[in-house]
Amino acid sequence: MTASVCTLAHGRERHLSNLVSGLARNRRQPMELVVAVMQDREYDLPETDFPIRQIVMGEKGIPLAQARNRAAAEARGELLVFLDVDCIPDPECLADYAIAAALNDGVFMGEVGYLPKGATDAGIDYARFERVAVKHSERAGPPAGMVGECGDYRCFWSLNFALTKAAFTQIGGFDEGYDGYGGEDTDFGRTFVSQGQPLWWVRGAKAYHQYHPHHMPPVHHIDSVIRNAQYFETKWNAPTMEHWLRAFELMGLVKRDGQGGFVKLRDPGPAELALTRQQEHAPYASASKALALMEERIARGEPAVPQAEMAAA
């Protein structure tokens, strides 16, 4: 089964170069790498034995669903392996996916190890990556066997996954009604499961996530989160991104509209940005940790976002 690797990128040139270098070290080489470029210029990338095709989409914001669909449409392989631009694939990543897909139908989600800041400064060293990488506390561990069925569509995450191109085409790809950040992954998982297809955790198929600063919950994407949550609710008659919206509510950024949705009250200020980036030292940020901290403060009769934090921002 031939495999195309698909990614989408905006900025982060060094991260993308490391992804390419990781693919070049894979025991099973891809037939190609397809990059949906969400900016006006192509990237200057390392030379490889496999072709790299860059599809320039221009500066049109960050249309994640559209970019993934474009990369998949351009891909020529029978198996599509989607890797986030921040991922460095393990040398066995593509081989593990190929074996899983040869024996099962569905969507496959590989392991992810989160690297701390500076882990890639000395180049790609898988032994070092394995020593320092950590698993996300809110993600399931690898299954006991080669694959294990995932029973909750909400666990689907596009960071590191694979499926056949035929399966991707059959479900129609990602819903481009989601504009910007948030919701499109959960929708994809629900769509796939609603068609009777399984989601699988894969033992192996590992990618190492390169550090980058990030706000979590994503207050810097508040507008698209609100808009996409409403789109999901209308489409599926079910909520999504509830923990993010709850955090926004505690911060006083949104309020409920009385009809199951939310309206924005204001943009995040220095205090909210400081609170949501407080985990910058960690390999990954956790919305649950930020939400729990705010809930604890409120239970003690304190504001969710203290004035001292605001002054320090």
Image (cartoon, rainbow, N blue to C red):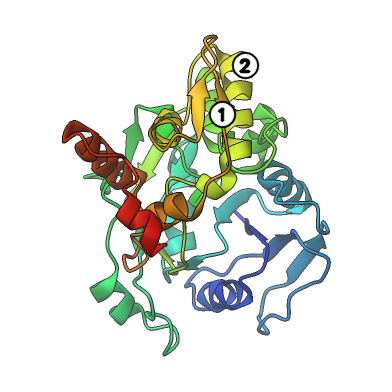
Q: Which amino acid does label 1 sit on?
A: Asp
In the shown orientation, is residue 174 left or right of residue 246?
A: right
Write the residue at 62% across / 37% down: 223
Q: Where is residue 256 in the image (x, y as percent from the top left)?
A: 49, 19
Write the residue at 45% across / 38% down: 156
In the shown orientation, is residue 22 left or right of residue 73?
A: left
Q: What residue type is labelled 2?
A: Lys
Q: Position of residue 42 (x, y in %)?
A: 79, 72
Q: Residues within 10 Å of mark 2 (few under 14, many from 20)?
A: few
Name which quarter of the figure residue 168 lies in.
top right
Q: How crowded is mark 1: few (under 14 residues within 10 Å), some or many (20 or more)?
A: many
Question: 146 or 267: which is nearer to us?
Answer: 267
Q: Can you see residue 18?
A: yes
- Looking at the picture, does residue 265 appear above or below residue 1? above
In the shown orientation, is residue 277 left or right of residue 61?
A: left
Identify the mark at residue 311; answer none if there is no mark.
none
Using the numbered discs, state the Cα–Cα distance from disc 1 to disc 2 in whole angstroms.
Answer: 9 Å
Circles 1, 2 touching at the beta carbon (< 8 Å) = yes
Write the residue at 74% across / 51% down: 61
Q: Name the residue under label 2.
A: 235
- Looking at the picture, does residue 25 appear above or below residue 266? below
Question: 230 or 71: which is nearer to us?
Answer: 230
- Looking at the picture, does residue 309 appear above or below residue 176? below
In the displayed image of the protein, which residue is found farthest to the left?
300
Q: Position of residue 225 (x, y in %)?
A: 57, 36
- Looking at the picture, does residue 85 appear above or below residue 49? above
Name which quarter of the figure residue 39 lies in.
bottom right
Question: 298 or 111: which is nearer to us?
Answer: 298
- Which secondary structure, mark 2? helix
Q: Name the residue under label 1.
A: 187
Write the residue at 64% across / 75% down: 13
